[in-house]
Image (cartoon, coloured by chain):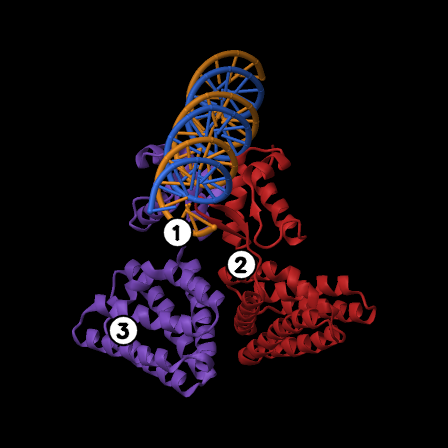
Chain colours: A red, B purple, C orange, D blue
Amino acid sequence: MEKRHADLIAEQLEERIFDGTHSDGDRLDEVRLAEHFGVSRTPLREALQRLARSGLVELIPRRGAFVRQPGPVELLEMFEVMAEMEAACGRLAAKRISDAALAELHSANEKCQAAVSAQNTDDYYAENEKFHKIIYQEAGNGFLAKETGNLHRRLQPFRRQQLRFRGRMAQSMSEHKAILEALEAGDSEAAAHALRGHVAIQGEKFHSLMAGLKNAAE
Amino acid sequence: MEKRHADLIAEQLEERIFDGTHSDGDRLDEVRLAEHFGVSRTPLREALQRLARSGLVELIPRRGAFVRQPGPVELLEMFEVMAEMEAACGRLAAKRISDAALAELHSANEKCQAAVSAQNTDDYYAENEKFHKIIYQEAGNGFLAKETGNLHRRLQPFRRQQLRFRGRMAQSMSEHKAILEALEAGDSEAAAHALRGHVAIQGEKFHSLMAGLKNAAE
DNA sequence: AGTTGGCATCTTGTATACAAGAATGTTGAC
DNA sequence: GTCAACATTCTTGTATACAAGATGCCAACT
């Protein structure tokens, strides 16, 4: 074996939670999952502990592992934190970003624009991802980049929902433009403000989306 | 057993790393530690994984667990992130804080002042802690409060060093005053700015402290 | 009938046994 | 004398066996 089983199991379990195989509140039976994945309980327990650290699973002593999908409230909270962290990245990146990175941002943004014109949400999503990742990196703070990337990844499945909103991609593009300009100008406050708004609006959109699902209107 | 061994082991190991029993780069031998703590390798490995998630230990596949104390660079990065997170707490708390919490902040601050007058660093530290915790809570975002608390805890051993600086406590008090005024006025930007500066300066002080250790001057 | 206590069973937490990869030391050849 | 290949040994990763807490059910008692 070239890679540890526990790692693979963790990824697969994560996948199964995201795709709804295990929904919120479900108890994850160690022995069943172990035999399902064809391993013993030991690596499976390792995987569960990992997911617990990521927040996907709650590990209650002597009770077991329970799927813990963030509810609407927690999700809003997470988006709010995401907004603040991206703002922080922007604040720092404005002072530290390299010309090469700025060029990359321009490139990603143009591809984004192309994707919008082509109505290609997949491409848009990929380039948008790249756009933000560059900013994380250029904040010049490895710890911040790592933490922000973690949260980003955790919100990924929910973030994607946003793109369904009519006109969201176009609006997002104009927000990107403001971000880019602030970074180019080295204006920390403007960059932070633009990024905060850019991400915060996603949380709000998400909120509307969930409300919309209940009302079945709009 | 009322509590899981792995939890206790994790805490004790953390303690041993902080107090220097295991220094940076040391390999943590599973069997030796297991017999030292009087448990088997299984709970010890669990503990190691936990510490790995906290960042105290690096887990290299098929190689073992190595103590990974943050170096000066990473530490500065962490303080920088801490500053941004506290700023975020302040920004949100300015809009959401309750009158009761404001009263508590005043109270903590007064006790802080008393501790400064009495040159009592322990009391100062405790009340300062309370002061910040209240702000985390009053940000009205459970997720943010949790994450900020985590980082705070992780920086705790380093943070404490700051108080050794002559005049730091007094300076800190005046910063607290600015924070409090901003929160009372509901001024998000001012609160964020004040808190960011308040924490950032700790990182800088720490930097000086480390440089001072090398130069053996001042 | 409701409640409570005890028992059976199930599940987690821990220990130990086993397998496989990595490190190291030795021996042989050049 | 040095380098390399092999074998030995050590350590991690995994499986299984065992112990102990938790859950649920049934019966007996109020």
Q: CA distance from mark 2 to mark 3?
A: 31 Å
Q: Contact (CB < 8 A) between labels 3 and 1?
A: no
In the picture, measured across the screen, residue B53 lies left or right of residue B23, that is right
Task: Evaluate whether label 2 is on the same chain as label 3.
Answer: no
Which mark is in front, 2 or 3?
2
| Residue in front for this viewpoint, A144 or C4 | C4
Q: Quadrant of residue B115?
A: bottom left
Report helix, strand or loop for mark 3.
helix
Report helix, strand or loop for mark 2.
helix
**Rendered location of residue B161, percent (x, y):** 28, 63
| Residue in front for this viewpoint, B128 or C4 | C4
Residue A79 in sight in this render: yes
Q: CA distance from mark 2 to mark 1?
A: 17 Å
Name the residue that disc number 2 marks.
A146
Which amino acid type is shown beneath numbered disc 1?
Gln
**Rendered location of residue C18, percent (x, y):** 51, 21
Quadrant, the N terminus of chain A: top right
| Residue in front for this viewpoint, B63 or B114 | B114
In the picture, measured across the screen, residue A116 lies left or right of residue A131, that is right
Name the residue that disc number 1 marks.
B69
In the picture, measured across the screen, residue A86 lies left or right of residue D19, that is right
Q: CA distance from mark 3 to mark 1?
A: 26 Å
Q: Is residue B208 above or below residue B184?
A: above
Which amino acid type is shown beneath numbered disc 2?
Lys
Which amino acid type is shown beneath numbered disc 3?
Arg
Q: Quadrant of residue A126?
A: bottom right
Query: Residue at 46% across / 66% down in the picture?
Result: B81
Name the residue that disc number 3 marks.
B168
Query: Residue at 60% across / 42% down in the picture?
Result: A9
